[in-house]
Image (spheres, rainbow, N blue to C red):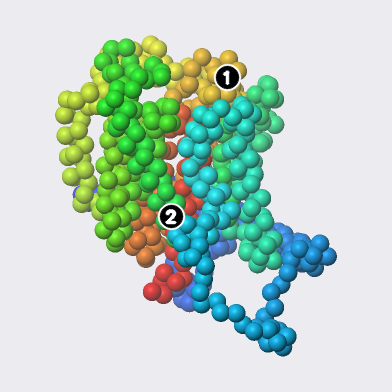
């Protein structure tokens, strides 16, 4: 039987298809099919519920009103006396001629203006700085905490940055006389509904308001990063630059991880089972092998997609070196969850890119597992009766059973945000451990109400990304979208065995990737080529 046919006949595929059909047929998210035989339908096959959803139509009308307000603000400022005092318009050439002014010879520019440093400084923009700080979150966070800034700055810098991103996105629209419309994306509405669901959950069940609000911030504040990035990054060229930056970050982390493993840098935590003889695990500047592994899971498919699409030999070599050191870094984290998540992400990538590569991939995976090294032993140990017994008594399986028992107390709404299995619960002495399963943690704290909301977001992410990949006729954009999608899917899969989204950087990076995929959606000019 063909691999693609097997996948299409699987339970998971048909379940996702059912959700898609229900969404498309609903009152809120109905996607218009368009008139048969119309020019628009034949030209552009890619459609989302942004095109014809009732909710989106209402939001667009509201945005038209906001645009008029931005135009009013712009003209009020430009026509103000204060603005005209400080703003001097240069006379045009005809005015200069009438005034009898001679044109100056501009053919010779100062040496400074011809220098690379000048051109580099000229290229730096506020938008570039803000996006750069966002993409470099893990490095910025590490530096801020290392240089000994006050605890207050260390705890709020990312919130200040998020606020600046929103302010700048609004400023750009005002500056352009309201001519830049809001970028409505397919994922925008599901994420907005998910945030509203979180707010309503705090109102419905919050035994302790301060803990509930803290728990809400830990989960939903990270989702907000999607929105300003979706407004500030709209071109596929900008997405490529960001992907290059992320691959560069991955290369640095890979090199540092290799150094740590070779130098046997002491581990700052108890990250191995008592029965295992493991001296060190790579953690780099991230501080946790599992989170470092998740970063590699996210970045590696990007690097693979870049090496497949790049035509420059030097760039290809850079991507190949990056892939090599990220793979080594991933292995040296000794994170079983990250290995399995990476295998799953590459499986998804191969299924979409070329199913014929699946057999060689499975062969390499089998060789890795049966190689007998430290890394393969950690994987095989998971299948041993000893691991099952220990895990059921005081390990991951035990924690999962406790979480399920807690959830049974209130199946629909759960215990309340911030009350079990996560960082907020640990900090407030409400939980003795992390649940090591973000989805179970969500179910325990938010019940069926919350887990359905999260499932809706993830399912629509899969649906919208699949549409972009399937409809794209530009092969380069298609492969880049596959790299972003499979990396994000890998991290989402890793959440089944770890609380990856408990670390703000990881959640932020995934929401950013979801925003970037929109820039690779097929456009009319892709079909005209």
Q: Residue furthest right?
A: 81
What is the quadrant of the C terminus in the image?
bottom left
Label 1: how many residues lie within 10 Å, few (<14), some (14-19) or many (20+)? few
What percent of the width, then of the height, locates residue 314?
28, 56
Q: Is residue 440 above or below residue 189?
A: above
Which residue is more in the foreground, 249 or 110? Answer: 110
- Say whether residue 54 is visible: no
- SS class of the residue under badge 2? helix
User: Residue at the location (57% across, 19% down)?
Assistant: 427
What percent of the width, then of the height, locates residue 340?
31, 34
- Say whether residue 272 is visible: yes
Could you tell whether 336 is left or right of 147 in the image?
left
| Residue 427 numbered mark, or none | 1
Could you tell whether 97 is left or right of 293 in the image?
right
Please give the residue where the numbered disc 2 appears in the rendered image: 241
Label 2: how many residues lie within 10 Å, few (<14), some (14-19) or many (20+)? few
């Amino acid at each position: 039987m063909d691999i693609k046919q097997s996948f299409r006949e699987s339970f998971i595929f048909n379940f996702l298809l059912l959700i898609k059909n229900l969404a498309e047929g609903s009152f809120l998210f109905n996607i218009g099919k368009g008139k048969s035989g119309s020019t628009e339908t034949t030209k552009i096959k890619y459609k989302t519920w942004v095109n014809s959803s009732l909710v989106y139509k209402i939001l667009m009308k509201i945005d038209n009103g906001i645009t008029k307000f931005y135009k009013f603000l712009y003209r009020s400022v430009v026509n103000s006396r204060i603005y005209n005092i400080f703003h001097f318009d240069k006379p045009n050439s005809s005015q200069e001629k009438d005034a009898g002014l001679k044109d100056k010879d501009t053919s010779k520019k100062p040496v400074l203006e011809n220098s690379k440093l000048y051109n580099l400084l000229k290229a730096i923009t506020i938008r570039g700085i803000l996006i750069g700080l966002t993409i470099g979150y893990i490095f910025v966070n590490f530096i801020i905490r290392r240089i000994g800034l006050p605890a207050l700055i260390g705890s709020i810098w990312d919130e200040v940055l998020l606020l600046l991103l929103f302010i700048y996105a609004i400023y750009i629209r005002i500056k352009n006389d309201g001519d830049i419309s809001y970028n409505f994306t397919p994922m925008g509405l599901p994420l907005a509904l998910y945030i509203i669901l979180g707010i309503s959950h705090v109102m419905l069940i919050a035994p302790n308001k301060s803990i509930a609000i803290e728990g809400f911030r830990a989960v939903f504040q990270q989702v907000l990063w999607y929105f300003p990035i979706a407004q500030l990054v709209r071109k596929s060229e900008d997405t490529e630059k960001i992907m290059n930056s992320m691959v560069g970050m991955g290369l640095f982390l890979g090199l540092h991880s290799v150094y740590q493993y070779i130098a046997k840098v002491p581990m700052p935590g108890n990250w191995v089972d008592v029965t295992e003889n493991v001296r060190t695990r790579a953690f780099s500047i991230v501080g946790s092998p599992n989170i470092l592994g998740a970063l590699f899971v996210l970045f590696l498919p990007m690097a693979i997609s870049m090496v497949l699409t790049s035509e420059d030999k030097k760039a290809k070599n850079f991507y190949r070196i990056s892939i090599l050191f990220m793979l080594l870094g991933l292995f040296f984290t000794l994170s079983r969850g990250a290995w399995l998540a990476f295998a799953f992400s590459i499986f998804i990538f191969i299924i979409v890119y070329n199913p014929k590569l699946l057999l060689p991939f499975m062969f390499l995976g089998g060789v890795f597992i049966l190689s007998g090294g430290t890394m393969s032993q950690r994987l095989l140990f998971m299948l041993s009766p000893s691991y099952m017994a220990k895990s059921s008594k005081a390990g991951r399986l035990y924690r999962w059973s406790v979480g399920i028992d807690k959830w049974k107390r209130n199946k629909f709404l759960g215990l309340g945000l911030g009350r079990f299995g996560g960082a907020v619960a640990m900090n407030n002495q409400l939980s003795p451990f992390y649940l090591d399963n973000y989805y179970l943690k969500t179910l325990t704290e938010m019940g069926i109400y919350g887990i359905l909301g999260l499932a809706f977001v993830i399912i629509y992410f899969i649906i919208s990304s699949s549409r972009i990949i399937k409809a794209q006729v530009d092969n380069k954009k298609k492969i880049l979208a596959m790299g972003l999608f499979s990396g994000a899917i890998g991290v989402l899969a890793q959440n089944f065995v770890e609380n990856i989204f408990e670390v703000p950087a990881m959640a932020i990076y995934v929401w950013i990737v979801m925003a970037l995929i929109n820039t690779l959606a097929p456009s009319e000019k892709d079909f005209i080529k």
